Amino acid sequence: MSYIVPQKMPLRCFECGHISLSTMAGYGCKIAHKSLESEPGINVRRPDWCPLVEIPTPHGRLIDADALNIYDISPVNGFCVMGVTEEDIGLVDTVIEAEGDKKQDGESDN
């Protein structure tokens, strides 16, 4: 499962807010379900396995690309073409709305 957290990307685990303290296991990551006790340098940097990713802004409409049927093979001028059209992309559900200065849905490059 993914979480969208509107905050600045933390530089280290203790800035994140998704750590827990267990009397048995010590500090752990609530998202990755991993112990931080054996992780060197967590006071300095995020571990390589950190599940957080930053979504750059501004960005356009973000979609579930897995919902696209990229295996739709159509004959075009005697050749079989596999791909996705702009119309196909427009039909896929939006996961995160466009933000900032990017073009809004329906605007063209022309």
Image (spheres, rainbow, N blue to C red):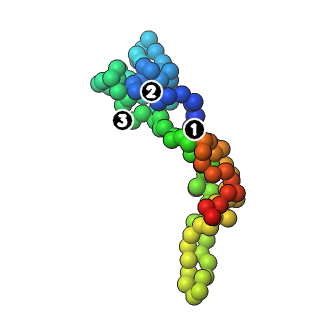
- Residues under numbered marks 3 and 2 in contact, where contact means CB atoms less than 8 Å apart: no
Mark 3 surroundings: few (<14), some (14-19) or many (≥20) residues within 10 A: few
Cα–Cα span, label 3 and label 1: 19 Å
Residue that protrudes farthest toward the bottom in the picture: 78
Q: Which residue is mark 2?
A: 10
- Residues under numbered marks 1 and 2 in contact, where contact means CB atoms less than 8 Å apart: no
Residue 33 visible here: no
Residue 1 image offset from top left, x and y in percent: 57, 38
Mark 1 surroundings: few (<14), some (14-19) or many (≥20) residues within 10 A: few
Cα–Cα span, label 3 and label 2: 13 Å
Circle 2 sits in a helix, a strand or a loop, which is it? loop
Q: Which residue is mark 3?
A: 48
Q: Which residue is mark 1?
A: 1
Residue 89 visible here: yes
Instruction: Tell me the amino acid under the disc marked 3.
Output: Asp
Residue 88 image offset from top left, x and y in percent: 66, 63
Instruction: Tell me the amino acid under the disc marked 1.
Output: Met
Most foreground residue, 54 or 21: 54
Q: Residue at x 61, y 82 (%)?
A: 75
Above/below status of 47 relative to 103: above
Residue 105's disc is: none
N-term mark: 3 or 2: 2
Circle 3 sits in a helix, a strand or a loop, which is it? loop
In the image, taking residue 78 as reference, residue 87 lies left or right, namely: right
Circle 1 sits in a helix, a strand or a loop, which is it? loop
Residue 3 falls in image quadrant? top right
